[in-house]
Image (cartoon, rainbow, N blue to C red):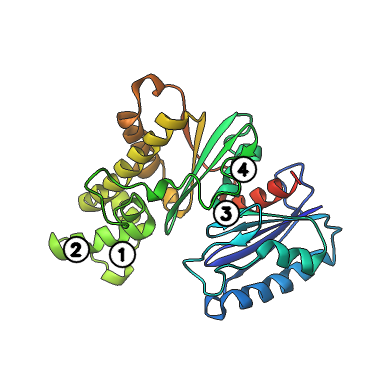
Amino acid sequence: MILGIEIGGTKLQLGVSDGFSRDLIATERTTVQRADGAVGILHQIEVLAARLLGKYAVQAIGVGFGGPLDSIAGVVYKSHQVEGWDGFDLKNWFHQKYSLPVAVANDCDVAALAEATWGAGQGKDSVFYVTVGTGIGGGSVNGGRLMGVGRPAMAEVGHLRLGLPATEPDSTVEAISSGLGIAKMARVCQSEKNWQPDVPTHQLTAERVGCLALGGDLQAISILRCATDTLGWAIAQVITLNAPDIIVIGGGVSHIGEDLFLSPLRESTCRYVFPPLVNSYRILPSALGESVVIHGAVALASQL
């Protein structure tokens, strides 16, 4: 049995699997107590893991961490969401605590591995995964193996700068196409374009913009189109450089749906990609949903 763990900025998920299928035998989930920092999250892991380890004969642990880390040494570089992770030896902590083989990697990277192993990219040689949520991240798998292992970052499609004029660090794809980017653009339109969506400013989330667009609000549709155009341009650069067979789109923003998000995203990607590659790839929604990082952590540990 393998224990897969997702350590995110807002959620903590653990699951047990036999490592041979996408089925999770048992799971534990909770909300991260961010105010308690890394120490508090480690305590939460101990509590949840004890429930599973007491029932199942776990032989290895896989961890998907929400931030950049050295996946070989197992040391966190930095967390942008929770205090106390910077420089933390995550792999060693698990090994010392549970005396089991441990594999750790970035959460987007293991999500890519999950989709390549058991999800939308199953059976394909080259899979690129993009998560579109609060931020935007990516992961790349080739021949069943994660790319960029041991590097501080890899496949960070959300951090691509938008052309030569984009000299500021925040002039990125993520700033426009992420959940936070969409919400920010909506607030700008509300204040500068006299857009009156009948929604308080503090409630103008990407999800709410999606609902307004679904109801036919033209400004909301325009905001989403800007997001999908920008992300499509970024994905086109990935395809032009690496020619993956499948691009898998996950994350909460992608749940806005086929008509308002995925279909326009495909159109934008096709418009910007190197023409000989137009028919060489497919863009598909994630097949593993909210448990994708757990599945990926399991897949990672099964390679130990």
- Tell how many labels: 4
Mark 3 or mark 2: whose residue is earlier in sequence: 3
Verify CB contact (< 8 Å) between mark 3 and mark 4: no
Callout 4 amino acid: Leu
Residue at screen point 73% across, 49% down: 301
User: Looking at the picture, which amino acid does disc 2 mark?
Assistant: Gln
Name the front one of labels 3 and 1: 3
Please report the residue visible at 64 percent of the width from the left and 38 percent of the height from the top: 145
Q: CA distance from mark 1 to mark 2?
A: 10 Å
Mark 1 vs mark 2: which is more N-terminal?
2
Q: Which label's residue is closer to the chain start, 4 or 2?
A: 4
Q: Are marks 1 and 4 in contact (CB under 8 Å)?
A: no
Question: Residue 39 placed where, x, y %?
Answer: 63, 77
**Mark 3 and mark 1: span between their CA atoms?**
27 Å
Find residue 204 and name its label.
1
User: What amino acid does circle 1 point to?
Assistant: Leu
In the image shown, does 302 or 252 lie closer to the viewer?
A: 302
Q: Residues within 10 Å of mark 3 (few under 14, many from 20)?
A: many
Task: Give the alpha-carbon distance from disc 3 to disc 4, as whole Å.
Answer: 10 Å
Image marks 1 and 2: residues in contact by CB distance under 8 Å: yes
Q: Earlier in the sequence, mark 3 or mark 4?
A: 3
Comparing 53 with 195, the one in front is 53
Say the numbered circle drawn on residue 107: 3
